[in-house]
Image: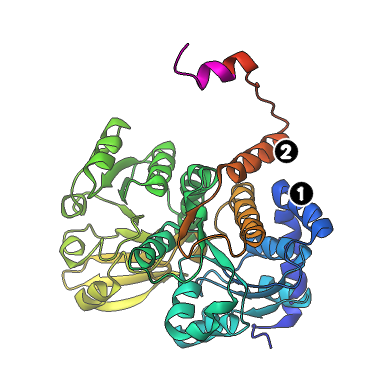
Amino acid sequence: MSEIRDLSLYPAGEQKIRWVAGYMPLLSSLARDFSESKPFSGLRVALSVHLEAKTAYLCRVLQAGGAEMFVTGSNPLSTQDDVAAALVHSGMEVFAVHGADAETYHRHIEQVILSRPNLIIDDGGDLVNLLHNEHPELLGDVIGGCEETTTGILRLAAMAKEKQLRFPMMAVNNAKCKYLFDNRYGTGQSVFDGINRTTNLIVAGKTVVVAGYGWCGKGVSMRAKGLGAKVVVTEVDTIKAMEAVMDGFTVMPMEEAAQIGDLFITVTGCRDVITKAAMQRMKDGALLCNAGHFNVEINVGDLEALAVEVYESRKNITGYRMADGRVLHLIAEGRLVNLAAGDGHPAEIMDMSFAIQALSAQYLVQNAGKLTADLHAVPEEIDREVARRKLAAWGVSVDTLTPAQEAYLHSWNV
């Protein structure tokens, strides 16, 4: 039985879903295909992704393919109660409430797991971890799953290395049509959408410190520069640090950057990126936020320990007053700023990422019993199919190699 805030909220959720559907042509084309072929007929799908309108449309596409959907959110602050209500109204089991405490959040994930899923759609690895650690008796029902995020892939890779992963998982995050666009352009735009709407402050002229220069960090840095900021990058990887320098950014350790930064954005996927040592050096009024998956990159415990006063600076911003009078402002409790303080990535971007999710789920069903219990790359043909459909939706055509060109590119004796 679903557990949501209020079923009567569904009309507002339907409106949100209709809006994004109009800008997600790939998912719309897959919905038409799946409605005819029913690739998920008779299968139960457990999904834990940020529960907002774009995710809801993915759920509807899978449902159109015959799936019985069991849905929860991957972050309590990104759950939208009206969207959850819309999914329940359309016949899905949903366990998600905005702002749920840790105990409730865990219970909701467990409720989805107890559906005895055949397919997993995960974002951050919570479903997979709980299934392996707390309900191993249900593992035999699982054909496989898909993982959306960098953080989730790291978890899965560790499980696979230790031979603990019990079913095949598709590394959706590592598909080119995911990380080259979602991680870079999607994160870059949505992070500043969340920051700007929450703070109502200008970016131009500020020093923005971006922790991490992976694809998400590249996107955030690029957008900060485009908005007129001076950008400082912090890194632990020497090659990525070199990339940042050659892309025109200043690189230095976090404790040095702490003294000059106005806005700090963590995008590493690791814990304790900003700790007491940096906080003690920050300017009065410094803004801190996180764009990595979990709220562990900014050590909130250190902030609380340093503060002599904690108060609400503005809606969704917490002020921490230090003993010397400085105030550091934390946006959205250190959770994902683009979702906990915004609506997440633009619809056109998630159209590609979720198309890969849907096609990878179909691939798992088509290859049930043939794939090893390991972390698998998304087949190149899925990436190519998503790119082909996206270009077609844009009305863009590309050249085709001639037979002579094909032979030239695939021969050593030319």
* Left or right of 251, for residue 397: right
From the image, state whether disc 2 or disc 1 is nearer to you: 1
The residue where tag 1 is placed is 29
* Left or right of 356, for residue 326: left
Q: Kindly tell me whether residue 50 is visible in this rendering.
A: no
Q: Which residue is drawn at 61% across and 39% down?
A: 384
Q: In which quarter of the image is residue 48?
A: bottom right
Part of the protein shown in magenta: 406-414
Q: How crowded is mark 2: few (under 14 residues within 10 Å), some or many (20 or more)?
A: few
Closest to the observer: 134 or 187?
A: 134
Residue 83's x, y, as percent? 68, 70
Could you tell me how far apart the alpha carbons at marks 2 and 1 are, in whole angstroms? 10 Å
Q: Residue at x 46, y 69 (%)?
A: 125
* Left or right of 336, for residue 70: right
Residue 334's x, y, as percent? 38, 67
Q: In which quarter of the image is residue 365?
A: bottom right
Residue 337 is marked as none
The answer to whether residue 410 is magenta is yes
Closest to the observer: 303 or 46?
A: 46
User: Decide: marks 2, 1 in contact (CB < 8 A)?
Assistant: yes
Closest to the observer: 365 or 186?
A: 365
Q: Does residue 204 sit above or below 319 in this rendering?
A: above
SS for callout 1: helix
Image colouring: rainbow
The residue where tag 2 is placed is 393
Q: Does residue 266 sit above or below 144 in this rendering?
A: above
Q: Work out whether mark 2 precedes mark 1 in sequence or the reverse, and give the earlier one.
A: 1
Q: Which residue is drawn at 27% across and 43% down?
A: 232
Residue 20's x, y, as percent? 70, 55
Q: Which amino acid does label 1 sit on?
A: Ser
Q: Does residue 310 sit above or below 53 in this rendering?
A: below
